[in-house]
Image: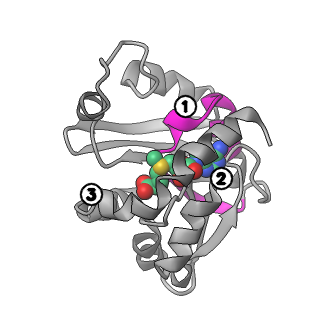
Amino acid sequence: MSEDHTRVQEFFGVRAADWDRKFPGDGPAFAAAVAAIGLRPGDRVLDAGCGTGRALPELRAAVGPSGTVLGADLTPEMLAEAAQAGRRAAGALLLADATRLPLRDGCLDAVFAAGLIAHLPDPQVSLRELARVVRSGGRLALFHPIGRAALAARQGRELTDDDMRAEHNLRPLLSASGWEPTSYADEEHRFLALAVRRP
Ligand SMILES: C[S@@+](CC[C@H](N)C(=O)[O-])C[C@H]1O[C@@H](n2cnc3c(N)ncnc32)[C@H](O)[C@@H]1O
């Protein structure tokens, strides 16, 4: 277990029990983000950094009973809350690092990641790993139910030019990691960047 992993687990471990109560109004934004991926019945989708599994029911609804939904997270307490909330009914929960996934190359149609990339020590390595497990032409959605400016204000920090999720930084990062960026939205109540796995 690396120091970065321990830091993530300590940070989110103590927040897990209150996570869903803290953000009660996010449901519609999650639903709209999942709809934007364009999943089809039977698709296989991973929620990377799934936390308490808030997106899992929407992902299951999108891929239907014949599809596969996986939720992977590094923090056991987040997964325990997901299980407690009954989200295993929507998808399988994996205690796993998004940077070293226990999945075969190209086995997924899409990856959804909400609030994950800001917590990755080396985003390029992790985005490459997500590209590894997605088939050519498959999709990636990097989402946050709040825009960058509003999040920075909530966290009491200034939004700077080197912010990794700024379009001028994220596009080259995605391109260098096996993804073709296809759309970018940074609004008050939504951050959503979509990309397609390059052949
Ligand atoms: C901001 S929370 C978002 C949780 C959930 N996606 C949501 O939107 O409610 C970030 C989550 O990413 C997880 N995480 C951070 N680094 C990770 C990694 N390398 N692999 C897997 N999960 C990670 C944390 O444990 C945490 O649950």
Dots 1, 3 in contact, CB < 8 A? no
Q: Dot 1, crowdedness within 10 Å: few (<14), some or many (≥20)?
A: many
Label 2 beta carbon within 8 A of ligand 1: yes
Q: Is residue 106 left or right of residue 140?
A: right
Q: From the top left corner, tell me how far across and down residue 136 is, in percent.
A: 65, 50
* Label ID, residue 29: 3
Q: Nearer the viewer, residue 84 or 62?
A: 84
Q: What amino acid is at disc 1?
A: Leu
Position in image of residue 128 (x %, y %):
68, 37
Amino acid type assigned to the residue bearing label 3 in the image: Ala
What whole-number distance in Å separates the C-alpha atoms at marks 2 and 3?
24 Å
- Relative height, residue 30 to residue 149 (above, below): below
> Which of the 4 quarters of the picture holds residue 43?
bottom right
For label 2, the residue is 74
The boundaries of the magenta stretch are 107-131
| C-beta proximity under 8 Å, tags 2 and 3 | no
Q: Which residue is located at x 65 percent, y 53 percent?
A: 74
Question: Which of label 2 and label 1 is nearer to you?
Answer: 2
Query: Could you tell me residue 92's position as x and y percent?
Result: 63, 75
Indicate which disc residue 174 carries: 1
Nearest to the eye among marks 1 and 3: give it.
Answer: 3
Helix or strand or loop: what does disc 3 sit on? helix
